[in-house]
Image: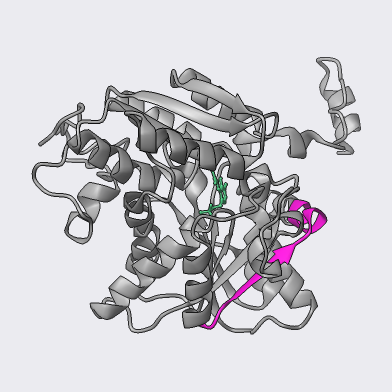
Amino acid sequence: MGLFGNKTAKSSGAHQWRGVIEEYRDRLPVSAKTPIVSLREGGTPLIYACYLSELLGNDVWIKFEGTNPTGSFKDRGMTMAISKAAEDGAKAVICASTGNTSASAAAYAVKAGMRPVVLIPNGKIAMGKLAQAIAHDSTILQVNGNFDDCLTLARDLATDYPVALVNSVNPYRIEGQKTGAFEVVDLLGDAPDLHVLPVGNAGNITAYWKGYREYNQDRISSKLPQMWGFQAAGSAPIVKNKTITNPETIATAIRIGNPASWAQAIEARDSSGGVIDSVTDREILAAYRLIAAKEGIFVEPSSAAGLAGLIKYKKAKKLPTGKKIVITVTGHGLKDVQWALEGAAKPKIVPVNAKAAAKALGL
Ligand code: AN7
């Protein structure tokens, strides 16, 4: 259809990644009638992590979702959710969010000429994400409550008023996000042994598992990975097997006490022979610093939960060795810079003088 400005510029023969719907059209619920709303999401780097491979005694690959158009994996699902909302003639979309969903929903909604409405928990969202929602012209309501309260309110509004819900309870979100698994298999030639990722609302672990299973059913991969998910210790309802009324963690993206895809996450864990466990904020921050300092990959704190979990399992001698492990790091570090700056030494001040600068550098 080529709506919403998705023209193909053909000049030099170079071509760019077309976005997850065009790249995986035959595996997604779209038709010729669906207007495709895309910012060319997906096609994210799968980076071999030399330092982490050595440290963990495994072949470790990082799927860096921070390079998506709005800086998180949410764009994969949002291109689907907004395209289907456009097909249905929606004029406004609503979501509850700890920040990344709202940034993504807002960007894709305005691209489609719709009005974005976002509900965020009062005071508990990273500044970069709030800035994105504002920049993309959304109407923002700060709700007196946490993410789970926001989601309840968003569902009520979408039931009774003319706004389409684009949270991951919208099945099209999961469909779009499953393309992350397709890309991993397409790039590695088969599924990894372990796939590791953070768990908040549990949409992404559900989506990856769906993607891996679909490729395996069609014999594009020869095996299925174990799914390993990690929650923040103060927000670990699946690990504790009970709803957390007041979830707490510095990893605000996964500060969720009642995950929407809870049952599907359990299913992914159990049918893959994987684990869902928790990591403390201290472990998350250590992993967050390590991956930036040693691998050159800057992620937001929540995104480091998967790596934190692997390090915890390694220390406890519960990590296998010699396996192929993919870790999805879900969001970009620039969204939430506070934790990089916290406790960091101030840069030294020097005059415009090579001798003085060299001295300060210890050269
Ligand atoms: C960086 O934006 O729930 O388990 O409202 O932003 O699929 O929920 C974000 C979740 C991991 C957890 N990493 O993924 C929201 C929201 C980052 C995130 C998760 C989120 P799910």
- From this viewpoint, is residue 298 visible? no
Report the magenta residues as a range: 273-286
- Is the image coloured rainbow, by chain, by secondary structure, or in one colour? one colour
Provide residue 310's location: percent of width, then percent of height. Answer: 68, 70
Give the image location of residue 128, x and y in percent.
60, 29
Q: Nearer the viewer, residue 332 or 34?
A: 34
Q: Is residue 171 above or below residue 102?
A: below
Counting from the top left corner in percent of width and height, residue 357 is at 85, 26
Give me the residue at 86% from left, 29% from top.
346
Q: Quadrant of residue 92?
A: top left
- The image quadrant where one finds the N terminus is top left
* Residue 282 on the magenta segment: yes
Relative to the observer, which residue lies in front, 241 or 75? 241
- Compared across the picture, whether 29 is left or right of 329 comes to left
Q: How many marks?
A: 0
* Left or right for 212, reference 320: left
Is 336 above or below relative to 281? above
Residue at the spot x=32%, y=56% of the render? Answer: 175
Front-lying residue, 212 or 298: 212
From the viewer's perspective, is residue 64 above or below residue 353?
Answer: below
Instruction: Report x, y in % for residue 47.
Output: 50, 59
Residue 217 found in image quarter: bottom left
Q: Quadrant of residue 327?
A: bottom right
**Is 85 contained in the magenta span?**
no
